[in-house]
Image (spheres, rainbow, N blue to C red):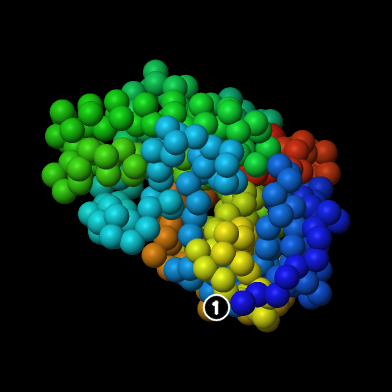
Amino acid sequence: MPAARAPEEDVPPVPEAEAGSAGAPGAYARLRAGRPVTRARLPQGEAVWVVSRYADVRRALADERLVRPVIATWPPGRGTASAARVLTLLELNGADHARVRRASAPAFAPRGLERLAPVVREIAGQHADAIARQGPPADLVAGFTEPFPLRVLCALLGVPEEERGEFVPHVETVLAATLVPLERVLGALERLQEYAEGLVDRGRARGSGLLGELAGTLERDDLVTLTVSLLMAGYKTNVQHFANALLTLLDAGPAARELVTPAAMDGTVEELLRHVPLMNAIVVLVATEDLEIAGRPVRRGDAVLPIIASANRDASVFTAADDFDPARRPNPHLAFGRGPHYCLGAHLTRLQLRIMLETLFARLPAMRLAIPREDLRWEEPSSPLRAPLTLPVTW
């Protein structure tokens, strides 16, 4: 039985992102060195276990005793029974999760995504051409990293162009769940559920596209769960990562052109996934029984935060872990998690990242920042989607 804990009035906050960064690499390094499993407090006030070392994060992500809570009802006592019906794949477990995952996984495997690749290339080319026609300086955020993953997601799910605004604000609210009032989060979840239900019904009626094809193997409720999951995970997280990935390559200067050649691209993509936090949001897991993590007692009901961005900078696993090194081999990063809930869209993100880099550097090979890096404007340090607000470039 875990020993009693001391009072937690003085528990420090979870580290915020550092200036000019998508994460908190310095703070994570200090945690790994001195307090690899420690208590910290979320912005809303909940005390949690923060896990920062690679080995512990890797184990926690795959530990069946640590499960995602239903976002509408966590922290305990703050949600409502009606909102608890809104589920994503991350919150499904056991046979329910396995059923949805088994039916949908082939569509998101590399071979299953082959027919989507031409659409992704066309969308990327349209935005790159528009930037080239506009001439320098141009903003890569407004011109590319914001619209590109949104249009790809809409193409995947069959969302008409005029409906894009019907779900994006709700996604942004849910992703900022630790920073906004719970009532807003619950309302956004309900709106997302309603939109997903309508989208699924239209897809089933058409019998084509991803939702129409999966209707042959998944029940309506399972399709709605999958659709909510994709709406939440398939857009804003990529906007955040793609902007930071481009900034990382722009920091490399002229050498960046060598990093996006066919021979180098695989290494570049994987290192960007390791080096740049895919999302600076909080992965909350809840213990279903008493357990230990690196010798620290975790009680049933405790929340655990495995910090993937910290694990991916652990020097015990990655040599010169803070350096961006596309030649890194092996590269066992945890950007997409691990275990049964390994990110379903991992290969879709890789596909988009690769095509984005190929397209932009083919159209604009001399691309470089148009302003000093220190003059870039960023999201607030507490934002779960920490990225440059603009990325002005010239060529």
The amino acid type, in three-letter code, at marker 1 is: Arg
The residue that appears at 43% across and 51% down in the rendered structure is 91
Left/right of residue 312 with respect to residue 18 in the rendered view = left
Which quadrant does the C terminus fall into?
A: top right
Residue 112 picture quarter: bottom left
Residue 252 seen in the current view: yes
- Residue situated in front as seen by the camera: 219 or 25: 219
The residue that appears at 37% across and 58% down in the rendered structure is 93
- Residue situated in front as seen by the camera: 262 or 162: 162
Residue 19 locus on image (x, y percent): 81, 48
Residue 92, relative to residue 233: is it above or below?
below
Query: Disc 1 on helix, strand or loop?
Result: loop
Question: Which residue is tagged 1?
Answer: 329
Badge 1: how crowded within 10 Å, few (<14), some, or many (20+)?
few
- Residue situated in front as seen by the camera: 129 or 233: 233
The residue that appears at 48% across and 68% down in the rendered structure is 65
